Image (cartoon, coloured by chain):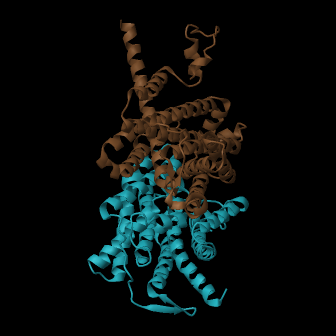
Amino acid sequence: MQQSSGTIQTDHTHSALPLIEKLKSLGLSLPLLICLTLLGLAPLFIQDEYILRLLVISLYFGSQALTFDFTGGYINAVNFGFAAFAGLGAYAAALVAIHTGLGAWAGLLMGALITGLVGFFTGLLTLRLRGIYVSLMSWFVGMTLMALATALEDVTRGARGLIVPPIYENATTTVYFYILFCIFLVVFVILRLIIHSRIGLAFRAIGQNFEAAQASGVNPTRYKLLNFTISSACAGLFGGFYAHYVGIITPDVMNMGYTMEIMALAFIGGSGSLLGGVFAAFLLIPIFDSLKYLMDYRLILYGLLLILVMIFYPAGLAGLYQTVIQKIKLAIKKQRPAS
Amino acid sequence: MDPSTTANLLLTGLLRGGLYALMAVGLALVFGVMNICHFAHGEYYVLGAYAAYFAYVTYGLDPIASIIIAAMLSFLAGVVTDKLLFSPLRKRSKGDWVVNAFLLTAGLSVVLQNVYRQVFGMRYRGITQYWNASIKLLGMNVSADRVIAFCIALLAIAALWVFLQKTRPGRAIRAVSQDEQGAVLLGINLDSIHTLTFALGSMLAGLGGASLLSLSPAYPFGGNKPLIASWFVVTIAGLGNVQGAIIGGLIVGLFESVSYFYLGQGWQDVASLGLLILLLLFKPTGLFGTQIKSVWER
């Protein structure tokens, strides 16, 4: 879908490959493009419903981990009510799709908008304070949302579950996969562009050294608020997709367990790497899912992995990848002068 | 509202508040000394409840003995946790301690909850009462268990206060909370103080779980509610403020019983959140918090 933007560029050093250069500036480097192409083509060759569903779920959790990392990995603020924020998006999208004639896509946008607003106000109250306050507040907000989703039976049907119509009539898992894939690509490119702009520089400065960032003229609260609002909105957007995909939502979608899962994926993938969580999701979710006896121990394993990563290897999978790449480059450099 | 309802609400609120204060004091202590936002605090509460259940029901021990054993086990669990997890993290952490330690406790919470679930199953393990008696208070019959649990909470807090004020290890804990580097210069062993602090915090939580066994049975996810309540208390009182946590606990207990009576489940959470929002708007340092530096000092 990016290919259409391949205009001719002359001032590039690698002018032979303007398209690749252009894509690279969007964050789609060559190894990543290969991965994405493989992933994008996979459903064309896979007929097995189980594997297709696994792909959708992995991509869903990967997308949420990406969104989580945008905040957690850059401005050092942990959204501890993340699943509830996503659940709010899910309910908003579902209610719009059910009660208005605007269709599923308007619902998704509405979900993003409402969740973004809740994120904005949560951040407005807490982001000027010490980092832990935003975690606490989003946790409390999340629990209140869950309690409300259970209590407001007239609107949400409580624990009996709200039945959500499909995005399109007779949409297959493959269709859902491509919808999610497109949303994921758009969100990734946008988040990645932000991270590599001046705004992203400010994010990282705030995350690494709050006082120094403040001293160099960055208004930390404003940037943090921007970041938190964006990631909340994205969480709501993906949540809305999830509502349509699973077809029925209960207040359990806001369960703390999902926050933990997404958080663990993001940090196992590597804090501040954006894509680390996506790779972690595609690595871990199929493993846990295919080994049925592991399902019961899933959360224990996630928790243990999170603990181990925190203590022994905070750089996560992304750090591992960087180290390996550097080692390979070094080895190549060493060989060249010899040959 | 007739007087008996008022008395009922007041009593339930206060008795509940005692437990919240006990849990919140442990939380504030761990935060103030170790700078850990402890998210697995509720799991030590559940551990205490399980330990008391097995001591009392399976081994037929005396109630007081069961509660003491539960508190000791939670203390031990705290020692093991610190040695196994926080101590290596302290050695390896480079400046991002607060977030890393917080995430570590979050992971620990998930692990412990699901381990309890695998080991003990989803069954509720409770008892009807420790003491077959009731006490007349404000014209109402209150089961002895609740009153004794409240007294245990107050006693434990008082004992902790004496410990922090009068004993050498207690004074060392306060010294570390005020100035870590200064404490090291005085020859205080940071590692053992951190371990002691974490163990004390866990013990307070375990004590709460054990003494309230007849009201809230041992259950793998039973730690969530006390955890939420105690974090609420600590946020309201001011992070790391131990004295504030005591009064805060009683206030939150009262607030919850009143708002539950008028609003019911679901909306009660909204009321709590509303209270928190007001506080963050007008007094973000908490009701009693000034500066977050020392424990039991202001």
How many numbered marks does the figure carry? 0
Q: Tell me if residue B292 can be seen.
A: yes
Query: Is B217 drawn above or below residue A67 in the view shown?
Result: below
Residue at 56% x, 7% y: name it: A16
Q: Position of residue B148 (x, y in %)?
A: 46, 84
B283 left or right of A54 in image:
right
Placement of the C terminus of chain B among the 4 image quadrants: bottom right
The furthest residue to the front: A169
Chain A drawn colour: brown
Query: Is A106 drawn above or below residue B186 in the view shown?
Result: above
Quadrant assignment, res A309? top left
Nearest to the observer: residue A184 or residue A72: A184
Nearest to the observer: residue A215 or residue A284: A284
Chain B drawn colour: cyan
Q: Tell me if residue A314 can be seen.
A: no
A219 left or right of B104 in image:
right
Residue at 42% x, 29% y: name it: A43
Q: Position of residue A244 (x, y in %)?
A: 53, 44
Residue at 30% x, 61% y: name it: B119
Query: Is B206 drawn above or below residue A4 in the view shown?
Result: below
